[in-house]
Image (cartoon, rainbow, N blue to C red):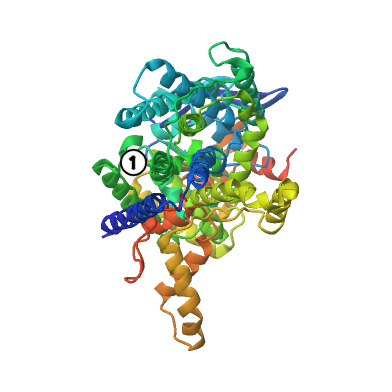
């Protein structure tokens, strides 16, 4: 069974049809790239998947259960985590706290336990600490654990966002332009990180990206969105040589 | 290891509070703290409770609330009416029990009403929430002014005087401790996440609405507690005390202390409560001086006294160590190890932030001579 299924999703903003009858499925363990020209509806697709925007029509299913109508934080608990196109970290908090916040509901000690510093509090905090450090280490951020999020270099901030998303124990990770604005070294580093976390956390990844070398380097399958419709899908090799895709990017007859 | 160190710091802070408590009691017994000073201490403690609780919503949660005095008045009237009508003892040991129960009643009533208005109001953001809470505060005032049971415009007189210096100090210390303990937990991290970025918080699995409601209700509870202390200190309640200006006064304490700093709010509450008293000698220019100090403060320290950072014993220790040894070590050309360098950097980075104690708490490899971490509850006076 497919992990994530999108069925005939339409999204209308006033007179604009941002998504037109989009359907696709993602199998467990895949790394899929969603590409397309600016304004094609890629971020809207992410917003629909996380229910930030409710689709006008259609259904989104994770492991066969519908996500439509759920709150965003519920979606996160069910197993979809995302990063943002423009970085949205908890700016004044440390990298460690950024990650800990994403694990907030994995140990549920109550308010009274924290006020009285009950054993459940200490146990919970120990779990948060160890798990958060583990994730930061895997993302190559261990040495920045105590640093304030905004003090990190740009590339590390992007990685921290991925670490934070990973901390929610997602089944599927949505990355919105993870390599945007990165220099080649940083992009390469990110590529390695994504491979590492995929190995270790067995997470399925759907990513939006414009950097073609990055996309072809990491993705096993690509989907191309243009004017709200999926116009092509297949291996990177197939997609890049698809005449429709070339027309969408460069303009055609 | 880490837990042990934290427990040690709790004990240290508790000991400091205890010492303060004993000092005040000895001074009272010696007659150095007379009725006037005693009254001032109670006022200061009430301000501290108000400022620290408002700081939870406005500074730490990041929601502008302009009706804190309204919740205080709910608590004040509820507690006063309870004491008058319950028939519980009003002197001796019975009186202590009465004020404890009455204060809880006051807090719970305020918390209940904050929940009622919080559910619709907290779906709004920024200015809208400010306006709603402002309106709510005014509604409370007008209702109190017209109800029979509250004595209307004449006010509610004949409330047994049960608040004393010790009860007010204990309540202030407990308030600081509870809010501090709440903030250094998973609940507190959720609160900070909401302030930093609501969309990201929601995407990280935080139920932002519930987080806001809980913090809002806790803050209102303590406003009610402060109201109860006030009612049982003065013995007379009049609705005009809890007007919009008073809400602003509390807000000024929070802003002046540094939005999001618990110790900052505490210090500012102490200063701003004592300032008008200290300026009595220049009575005519009192309000002028008060305003001038505020303006200068905002010009030269726009982030407030402490900004987002907290005053802590550990932080103080680090600061002194850096001042005394840091430069000397650098001048002598002693090379730092990578670890040390990173630590120093991390410290300077964090110092202006509220997370200074949050992160100091979890620092894994603190230097051996570092002092225990702060608990922040030792500065209520």
Q: What residue do we see at 43% from left, 31% from top?
A: A4
B316 and B216: which is toward the camera: B316
Question: Is A26 drawn above or below residue A199 in the view shown?
Answer: above
Q: Secondary structure at mark 1?
A: helix
Q: Is residue B341 visible?
A: yes
Q: What residue do we see at 26% from left, 42% from top?
A: A118
Question: Where's residue B114, x and y in %?
Answer: 51, 25
Residue furthest front in the image: B31
B324 and B102: which is toward the camera: B102
Question: Where's residue B223, x and y in %?
Answer: 50, 32
Residue furthest top in the image: B148
B237 and B32: which is toward the camera: B32
Question: Is A168 drawn above or below residue B28 in the view shown?
Answer: above
Question: Is B354 drawn above or below residue A142 in the view shown?
Answer: above
B218 and A151: which is toward the camera: B218
Question: Where's residue A41, x and y in %?
Answer: 63, 34
Density class for disc 1 (Cα within 10 Å; few <14, some 14-19, many ≥20) is many
Question: Where's residue B240, x and y in %?
Answer: 64, 26
* Left or right placement of residue B239 versus residue B340 in this view: right
Q: Is residue A30 visible?
A: no
Q: What residue do we see at 50% from left, 26% from top?
A: B76
Q: What residue do we see at 33% from left, 41% from top?
A: A114
Residue hosting label 1: A114
* Left or right placement of residue A252 versus residue B201 in this view: right
Quadrant containing the N terminus of chain A in the rendered view: top left
Quadrant containing the C terminus of chain A in the rendered view: top right
Chain identifier of the residue bearing label 1 in the image: A
Q: Count the marks: how many?
A: 1
Question: Is B283 drawn above or below residue B373 in the view shown?
Answer: above
* Quarter-of-image position of residue A81: top left
* Left or right placement of residue B210 versus residue A19 in this view: left
């Amino acid at each position: 069974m497919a992990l994530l299924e999108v069925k005939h999703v339409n999204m209308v903003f006033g007179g604009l049809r941002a998504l037109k009858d989009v359907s696709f499925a993602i199998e467990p363990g895949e790394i899929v790239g969603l590409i397309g020209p600016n304004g094609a509806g890629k971020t809207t697709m992410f917003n629909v998947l996380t229910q930030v925007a409710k689709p006008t029509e259609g259904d989104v299913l994770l492991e066969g259960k519908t996500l439509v109508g759920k709150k965003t934080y519920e979606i996160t608990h069910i197993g979809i985590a995302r990063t943002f196109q423009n970085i949205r970290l908890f700016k004044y908090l440390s990298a460690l706290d950024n990650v800990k916040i994403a694990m907030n509901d994995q140990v549920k000690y109550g308010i009274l336990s924290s006020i009285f510093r009950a054993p459940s509090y200490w146990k919970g905090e120990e779990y948060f600490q160890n798990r958060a450090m583990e994730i930061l280490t895997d993302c190559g951020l261990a040495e920045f654990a105590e640093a304030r999020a905004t003090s990190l270099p740009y590339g590390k901030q992007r990685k921290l966002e991925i670490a934070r998303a990973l901390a929610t124990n997602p089944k599927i990770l949505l990355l919105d332009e993870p390599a945007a604005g990165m220099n080649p070294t940083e992009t390469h580093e990110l590529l390695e990180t994504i491979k590492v976390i995929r190995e270790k956390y067995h997470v399925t990844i759907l990513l939006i990206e414009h950097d073609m070398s990055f996309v072809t380097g990491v993705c096993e399958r690509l989907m191309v969105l243009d004017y709200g419709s999926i116009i092509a899908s297949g291996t990177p090799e197939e997609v890049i040589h698809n005449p429709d895709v070339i027309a969408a990017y460069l303009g055609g007859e | 290891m880490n837990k042990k160190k934290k427990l040690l710091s709790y004990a240290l802070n508790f000991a400091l509070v205890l010492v303060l408590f004993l000092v005040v009691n000895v001074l009272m017994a010696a007659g150095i703290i007379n009725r006037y000073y005693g009254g001032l201490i109670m006022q200061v403690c009430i301000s501290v409770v108000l400022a620290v609780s408002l700081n939870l919503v406005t500074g730490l949660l990041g929601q502008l609330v302009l009706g804190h005095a309204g919740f205080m008045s709910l608590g004040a009237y509820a507690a006063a009416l309870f004491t008058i009508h319950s028939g519980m003892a009003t002197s001796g040991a019975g009186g202590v029990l009465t004020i404890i129960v009455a204060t809880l009643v006051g807090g719970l009533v305020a918390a209940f009403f904050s929940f009622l208005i919080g559910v619709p109001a907290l779906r709004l953001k920024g200015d809208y929430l400010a306006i709603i809470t402002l309106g709510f505060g005014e509604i409370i005032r007008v209702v109190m002014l017209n109800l029979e049971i509250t004595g209307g415009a004449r006010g509610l007189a004949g409330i047994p005087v049960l608040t004393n210096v010790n009860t007010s100090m204990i309540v202030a210390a407990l308030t600081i401790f509870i809010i501090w303990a709440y903030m250094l937990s998973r609940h507190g991290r959720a609160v900070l996440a909401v302030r930093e970025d609501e969309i990201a918080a929601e995407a990280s699995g935080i139920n932002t609405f519930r987080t806001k409601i809980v913090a809002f209700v806790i803050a209102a509870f303590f406003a009610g507690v402060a109201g109860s202390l006030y009612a049982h200190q003065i013995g007379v309640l009049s609705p005009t005390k809890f007007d919009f200006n008073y809400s602003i006064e509390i807000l000024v304490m929070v802003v002046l202390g540094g939005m999001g700093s618990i110790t900052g709010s505490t210090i500012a509450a102490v200063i701003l409560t004592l300032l008008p008293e200290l300026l009595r000698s220049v009575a005519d220019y009192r309000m002028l001086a008060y305003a001038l100090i505020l303006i200068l403060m905002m010009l030269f320290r726009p982030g407030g006294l402490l900004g987002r950072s907290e005053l802590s014993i550990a932080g103080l220790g680090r600061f002194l160590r850096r001042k005394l040894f840091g430069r000397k070590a650098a001048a002598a050309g002693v090379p730092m190890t990578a670890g040390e360098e990173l630590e120093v950097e991390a410290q300077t980075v964090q110092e202006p932030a509220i997370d200074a104690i949050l992160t100091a708490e979890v620092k894994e490899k603190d230097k051996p001579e570092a002092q225990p971490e702060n608990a922040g509850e030792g500065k209520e006076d």
